[in-house]
Amino acid sequence: MLFLLLGVGVFALDHRREGGAQGGRVIEVTGDQVEQLRTRWTAQWGRPPTGPELQALIEGAVDEELLYREAQRLGLDRGDAIVRRRLAQKLTFLLEDAGDRAAPTADEVAAHYARNAERYRRPRRTTFDHVFLSADRRTDPAGDAATLLGGIGAGDDGWKRLGDPFMLARTYADRTDPEIAGLFGTGFADAVSALPAGGWNGPIASTYGMHLVRVRDRRPARAPRLEELRDRVVADLRGERRRDHRRAAYRALRDDYAVQLPAGGGVASAQDQ
Amino acid sequence: MTALRSGTHPGLPAVCLSALAALACGTPAGDAEPPGRAVVEWSPPSAPAPATDPVPREPCGHRDPLRQAFFGDLHTHTAFSLDALGRGGFQTPDDAYRFAQGGEIGLSPVDEEGRPTRTARLARPLDFAAVTDHSEWLGEVAVCTDPSSPVYGTPACRGLRPGAAADDRAAWQADRQAGRGPAVCGDDGGRCRDGLLTAWDATRAAAERYYDRSSDCSFTTFHAWEYTRTPGRSKVHRNVILRNEIAPELPISWIDADRPRDLWTRLKTRCNDTGTGCEALTIPHNPNISNGQMFTLDWGGLPIDEQRARAALRSEMEPLVEMMQAKGESECRRGMWNVVGGEDELCDFEKVRYIDGGRPPDCEDGTGEGGLRGEGCQSRLDFVRYALIEGIAQEERLGINPIQLGLIGSTDGHNGLPGDTDEYDYQGHNSNVDSDIEKRITTPAYAPHPLRNPGGLVGVWAEENSRDSLFDAMRRKETFGTSGVRIQTRLFGGWDLPDLCASNDMIADAYETGVPMGSVLPPRAGSEAPRLFVTALADPGTSAYPGTPLQRIQIIKGWVGGDGLFHEAIYDVAGDADNGADVSRGTCERSGTGAASLCAVWTDPDFDPSRSAVYYARVVENPSCRWNALQCAALPEGERPAACGDPDLPWRIQERAWTSPIWYQAADR
């Protein structure tokens, strides 16, 4: 607040000394600018401004321009951290916007999708049955599992009565490897991922004990059709463009300047905050 | 355009819309506001949910009628939230959902070129998440961070943004004093209404982009926001979770609905009662810093029918409570007013109000203020266990239990990192404020960073990973909360449960012979005591950080005694409290053995059929290192901040899970 009062004082003194238009300075309000004022008002209030309202808008714009020029002439914009930061931020937004001016075309979206196919890939999914032997209930679950494996029937449902009670399911459909790891631990998931589809295998260790496992079906990883996730790809592409454009602009600007840092890059003495 | 409608309690027409709210308007009771604060309705008010068909989706490939556990986080903020922005956050809802799915995102502080200097990635992606940005000032943030806005350069807008000068901050504070400021929002509030719509639409668009509607059902998002009422710096916050994409035009904040019951009535008129398929539920969080205000039901003076109506509204709209999150655990505390029973040392866990070792005064049967700053009294109702018993007391009086809550955990992180709960790589929750270990383990004047924790998770037993299936499970309270680990646990109750731990079809048999957690036991036949079936699996962890084995399962029972006091009893039902397992402070290495899985069928040995009771299970891991000990141990000795040696800082924890309760209702109340 003190700063503001001082500023006004300086401005008033300065103004008296140099006198009005004799200084040769001109503020011109163009027809386009008036039209802009009218449009902004209309957008905000839902109706065009009346004559007196438009007059007041123009007066306000002239006042703002006067103050702005005088403040600039007095160097009030220099050495002010807020002004510095705001200008930098404004340029950042402009740079980003410049990178995202036009909506990407269908071809550009398709190309972005192709470039990042790995990110959008749908993972492999496995369907499997398992028989559980609890490490908490048995002294030798691995040995018991090996014995069970020898007598397990291939075709019927008899396997469902084998093993120990378990609070999760006996059959898991369409699971990704990370989902299987989340359920039974990473080691179990790795072992199951190496099993062929078909018969019973094991014993395979999990966090909870030993398992006999039968992989019933395996759907390979697939690339989804672009239509399945177009919205996301477009959003990703636009975000990437804004970031890229900002960074390229920073780099280009840096090329115009010689940046000098203290010895050691200034890192050692810098405190963050 | 009409003028902004605004007024002061009591007797404001905009608030006294429904019969329920009208009651509230004339009554300076309990959760009523101190007089003088303006309530400001949008002009025009938010439109109710539109009548549209839900977006179709494919059926899930992995549906299981016996239900499976899905892990998620229903409480995450991005830089759309004013407080997150102010601390240097820049994450968007898209970033948050990408992170939840396993993507890497950047964290502040940023370098000279605006690039994040830290990154974060989930070792294990989540199954579901909800971005819950604060609805308060969501519109103002949108207006003031848009450089093309006509008020972008005004002092009030500058003051909203981070790094503002003191004058500008004062301008923003003065402008928002009335709830919605003319400088930022315009005299009719229209600019902020437009801004709110923009931010809400962007939030919802992100939720739609990341919801997997294919038969893979790999990830679910929820449309959601946080309602952030904070009377006297006491938290009575609620997250609002919507069933699907059918939503009211605008999220509701305390500025336009200033008490929780005003929120509920508006959610009904604009969503649940519209017949459009819109459905909302609310989840309160941090009762631990609410100074009794979260669950104190000060309805005493009202006619009994009105009390019943309020209890019914609360019970209908609020099925769950967040019992664990970054700002502490809210289960229980020893020695609270008029609570008697078992000595429960496990209550000494992740308490954010042990500041300076001091114990806050007890509110007894009143309420206080200041919890957000670690000030004011603490009520037994600040803890979920005793709030559940209060629900029983109210039910015996009213015939309706207004606090019949299922349990969840979540994070409440403000960096857009849903589910980032691993102790070993906890990076703080508040951008620049707690961005390195020095800041995190050093206590500033009132923000107790060292007492904060990475946060909890919510587990949901649902048929499939889809919005409807998960939301149905939340409605029926078939949920559990964890302190951040991925323990899976189930609780069933009944009168004739067989030995389910020996059953080869234990879950099918449990549904057949009992009711799942979140339920009320069916009426008692004969004189036998209730039986509970509880089972749990240890967190498998990852290959780099294997999970910790289980130590034991406990059943917690609460009831109101003939003496009118709140009674608690804690029973060890599986595992071994004295298994000798421990952890070393210096290296954080764990020693000893525990269980990979635990199971019990338990009969209440102290059952009194004349007393209603609430039961829930607590599953406890062997001891492990808290995040501060892990992160100090990971540094070379010479590089550890001095506070690493702070003897008052808790360093050893027992991670845990809590099931939703099962209730017994005595017939002759």
Image (cartoon, coloured by chain):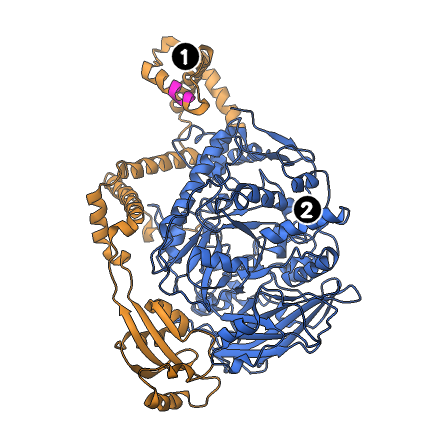
Q: Is residue B522 left or right of residue B55?
A: right
Q: Residue at x 75, y 57 (%)?
A: B397
Q: Residue at x 60, y 43 (%)?
A: B265
**From this viewpoint, is residue B242 visible?**
yes
Q: Residue at x 62, y 55 (%)?
A: B287
Q: Looking at this view, is A130 or B433 the one in front?
A: A130
Please determine whether, in this image, residue B540 is positioned above or below residue A4: below
Q: x, y (%) of residue A97?
A: 30, 37
Q: Chain of mark 2?
A: B
Q: Which quadrant is the N terminus of chain A positioned in?
A: top right
> Mark 1: few, some, or many residues within 10 Å (few <14, many ≥20)?
few
Q: x, y (%) of residue A10?
A: 47, 20
Residue under circle 2?
B31
Please determine whether, in this image, residue B222 is positioned above or below residue B548: above
Residue under circle 1?
A18
Looking at the picture, which amino acid does disc 2 mark?
Answer: Asp
Q: Secondary structure at mark 2?
A: loop
The colour chain B appears in is: blue
Q: Looking at this view, is B90 or A267 the one in front?
A: B90
Query: Does the magenta portion include A41?
Result: yes
Q: Looking at this view, is B247 or A244 the one in front?
A: B247
